[in-house]
């Protein structure tokens, strides 16, 4: 029986780097302590916005351990553990569990995209779930993988006792509705982009892992609270107010934009790791204007 509680807004935590490209662990802890004071449901270490593909395994495990150590009581700690092979995903998922992760978000393997049929993906996730010491969630993010796991495959996977949920970052609302209808109520269907937050709430999705929550988690949580209180127009209005900022820190400027926005909001976001490049001055000016218009300040 699924007893894991995943609810509310969860940041896919940015990873701060020093000017020479090292992981700034002290900055990570400082950010975490500030997040602890915000209205969040938990943390995702090693998400897409964490620059995870650029991290060494030892860096990843240190970030998981520090997050587990410093997270506020009662907040879930998720870790992104998906790798291309099933074997390596199992191994790393259990290492993350040893480091303190309570559940793992497992990315769809995608290098051999045309071969990732329903059969292949179901087998992959079931094997990982069978051998993982912590519950796992499926991570669907076609913007990066260029792969979309089918609703039917997710329906099958939702019947596995150790596969407890899914983060869907497609932004496809009809697909989210189809997923919601296909899986049991105990299955944690999580919206993976703030662009779909309000529509997801209307579908009774109760959690979001959102890039925007890195620096505007309180505002994202307020959208949910207003909606839950029946103040749907207020929730919708705030959601629309946040949309231009979300677009800027995801689609338009990516991780570099996310980090700069977080810096403007008072976090120690640090540098991006090469080959990502920092923002040009015009982009910084645009982000400052957008955050000001949305009322997001340090």
Image: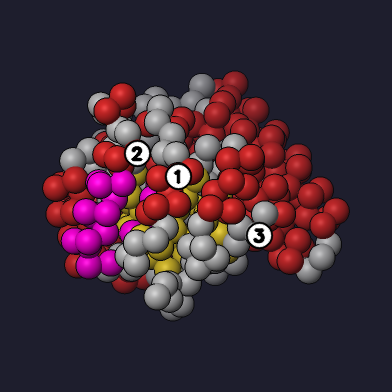
Point 42% across, 72% down: residue:
2
**Magenta-drawn segment:** 122-140
Q: Is residue 279 magenta?
A: no
- The percent coordinates of residue 217 (x first, y second) are 59, 56
Quadrant of residue 130 within the rendered picture: bottom left
| Lower sequence index among marks 3 and 2 | 2
Label 3: element kind: loop
Disc sitting over residue 118 in the figure: 2
| Image-based side of 15 in relation to 293, left or right | left
Q: Relative to 158, does residue 52 appear above or below in the rendering?
A: above
The residue wearing badge 1 is: 152
Give the residue drawn at x 63%, y 28%.
285
Question: Badge 3: how crowded within 10 Å, few (<14), some, or many (20+)?
Answer: few
Badge 2 density bin: few <14, some 14–19, many ≥20, Cα 10 Å = some
Whether residue 267 is visible to the viewer of this picture, yes or no, is no
Which residue is more in the foreground, 12 or 198?
198
Distance between the alpha carbons at the discs numbered 1 and 2: 8 Å
Residue behind mark 3: 204
Residue 105 on image: x %, y %: 36, 53
Residue 1: image location, x then y, percent: 40, 75
**Image location (x, y in percent) of residue 48:** 40, 41
**Disc 1, disc 2: CB below 8 Å?**
yes
Residue 131 visible in this rendered orientation of the protein: yes
**Mark nearer the viewer, 3 or 2:** 2
Is 229 on the left-hand or right-hand side of 40? right
**Does the stretch in magenta take in 134?**
yes
Rendered residue at 27%/54% (across/down): 126
Mark 1 or 2, nearer chain start: 2
């Amino acid at each position: 029986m699924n007893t894991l509680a995943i609810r509310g807004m969860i940041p896919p935590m940015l990873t701060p780097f020093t000017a020479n490209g090292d992981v700034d662990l002290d900055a990570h802890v400082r950010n975490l302590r500030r997040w602890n004071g915000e209205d969040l449901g938990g943390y995702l270490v090693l998400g897409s916005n964490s620059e995870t593909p650029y991290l060494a395994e030892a860096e990843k495990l240190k970030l998981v351990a520090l997050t587990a150590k410093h997270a506020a009581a009662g907040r879930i700690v998720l870790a992104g553990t998906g790798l291309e092979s099933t074997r390596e995903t199992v191994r790393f998922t259990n290492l993350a569990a040893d480091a303190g992760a309570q559940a793992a978000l497992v990315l769809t393997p995608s290098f051999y995209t045309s071969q990732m049929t329903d059969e292949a993906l179901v087998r992959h996730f079931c094997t990982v779930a069978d051998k993982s010491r912590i519950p796992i969630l499926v991570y669907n993010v076609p913007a990066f993988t260029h792969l979309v796991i089918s609703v039917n495959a997710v329906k099958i996977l939702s019947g596995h006792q150790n596969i407890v949920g899914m983060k869907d970052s497609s932004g496809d609302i009809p697909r989210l509705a189809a997923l919601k209808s296909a899986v049991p109520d105990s299955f944690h269907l999580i919206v993976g982009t703030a662009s779909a937050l309000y529509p997801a709430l209307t579908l009774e999705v109760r959690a979001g892992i959102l890039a925007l929550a890195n620096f505007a988690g309180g505002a994202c949580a307020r959208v949910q609270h207003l909606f839950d209180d029946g103040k749907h127009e207020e929730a919708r209005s705030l959601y629309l107010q946040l949309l231009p900022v979300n677009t800027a820190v995801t689609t338009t400027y990516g991780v570099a934009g996310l980090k700069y926005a977080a810096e403007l909001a008072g976090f120690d976001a640090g540098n991006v790791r090469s080959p990502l490049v920092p923002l040009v001055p015009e982009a910084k000016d645009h982000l400052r204007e957008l955050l000001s218009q949305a009322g997001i300040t340090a």
